[in-house]
Image (cartoon, rainbow, N blue to C red):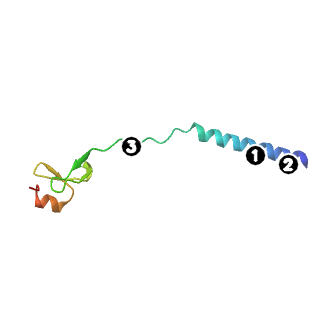
């Protein structure tokens, strides 16, 4: 019986060591590249260019500001 328990303990230690080594070898997740920013021509808020509303060759943060146009 003691040999069987020792065998189980050795298997458990090997299992833990294998799992620990697998965690160390995985590369860290790749960082996303920075996104280009734009500035609203009406209110001046900065936001990602992918969320911009284009109008009159300017970027706007929302449809309402595009409708109102460039702030004087």
* Labels 1 and 2: the sequence-earlier one: 2
Q: Which mark is residue 32?
A: 3
At horizontal 65% and vertical 43% (from top left) the residue drawn is 19
Q: Is residue 33 left or right of residue 17?
A: left
State which quarter of the image contains the C terminus.
bottom left
At horizontal 70% and vertical 40% (from top left) the residue drawn is 17
Label 1 – label 2 distance at C-alpha: 11 Å
The image position of residue 27, as x and y in percent, is: 52, 38
The residue to which callout 1 is attached is 12
* Labels 1 and 3: the sequence-earlier one: 1
Q: Is residue 13 above or below residue 63?
A: above
At horizontal 50% and vertical 40% (from top left) the residue drawn is 28
The image position of residue 65, as x and y in percent, is: 16, 60
* Labels 3 and 2: the sequence-earlier one: 2
Q: Residue furthest right?
A: 1
Label 1 – label 3 distance at C-alpha: 38 Å
Q: Is residue 61 left or right of residue 30?
A: left
At horizontal 25% and vertical 48% (from top left) the residue drawn is 49
């Amino acid at each position: 019986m003691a040999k069987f328990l020792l065998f189980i303990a050795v298997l458990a230690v090997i299992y833990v060591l294998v799992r620990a080594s697998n965690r160390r070898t995985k590369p860290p997740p790749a960082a996303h590249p920075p996104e280009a920013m734009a500035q609203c021509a009406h209110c001046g808020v900065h936001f990602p260019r992918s969320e911009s509303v284009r109008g009159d060759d300017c970027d706007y943060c929302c449809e309402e500001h595009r409708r109102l146009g460039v702030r004087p």
